[in-house]
Amino acid sequence: MGLVIYLIIAWTVICSFFSLQKKLPGVINILIFLTVQIVQINMFMIIVLRLRYFTYDSELMKFIVVIIHRDLILPFLLLIFINIISVKKTFRARLSYSFFTLFQLLCTERLLSILGYIHNSQKWSMLHDLLFDLVIMAISIFTAVVFMKLYSKGQRIHCDLSDL
């Protein structure tokens, strides 16, 4: 049952991303996706294997649900977030969409716990989920800003060379 729920959530999120009118170029979206994947997989592994704040269920179907969340839902929600806040001009609109994205991330993570796919220890709480999501959102914003500066710098150099 949980696999079907998370496949529907992943399908909805991925379709939403691809139907979104993107502000950022495709290269930037791919680089942000890969960077977010590297960072959040490493953060998950540190939290799970080193600190043992929570554990995954060892049953195959339940583990697949966690992987779908970690490798599809989380990064695509962050890509939607980055593309929308790059379009929005007012601080209020950016802040409201930031809260909406944070709410979506917290709901999908809480659903993993409710369905029993993640077993929380006494050390892990909703506050830790909130902090993890805020950190990963900040990292994705920082990554987008850095890659956009590099991309625009590359475009200027390319245009200058083509004038020769």
Image (spheres, rainbow, N blue to C red):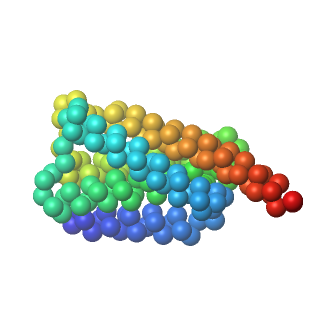
**Residue 85 point in image, percent of width and height:** 62, 49
Residue 121: % across, % down: 18, 35
Residue at 66% across / 47% down in the picture?
Answer: 150
Quadrant in the rendering for residue 48:
top left
Is 119 placed above or below 156 here?
above
Position of 114 with respect to 151 (left or right) is left
Task: Report the residue that reaches farthest toward the right.
Answer: 164
Image position of 54 (left or right of 20): left
Residue drawn at 65 percent across, 41 percent down: 92
Depth check: 43 or 103 in front? 43
12 over 88 or under it: above or below? below
Q: Residue at x 26, y 59 (%)?
A: 65
Q: Quadrant of the C terminus?
A: bottom right
Viewer can see residue 79 = no
Residue placed furthest toward the left? 59
Camera-side residue of 56 and 111: 56
For the N terminus, the image quarter is bottom left
Number of disc labels: 0
Residue 16: give x, y in percent of width and height.
51, 66
Q: Is residue 68 left or right of residue 136?
A: left
Q: Residue at x 47, y 48 (%)?
A: 35
Any part of residue 25 in sight? yes
Return the residue found at the far front: 164
14 is higher (above) or lower (below) than 57: below
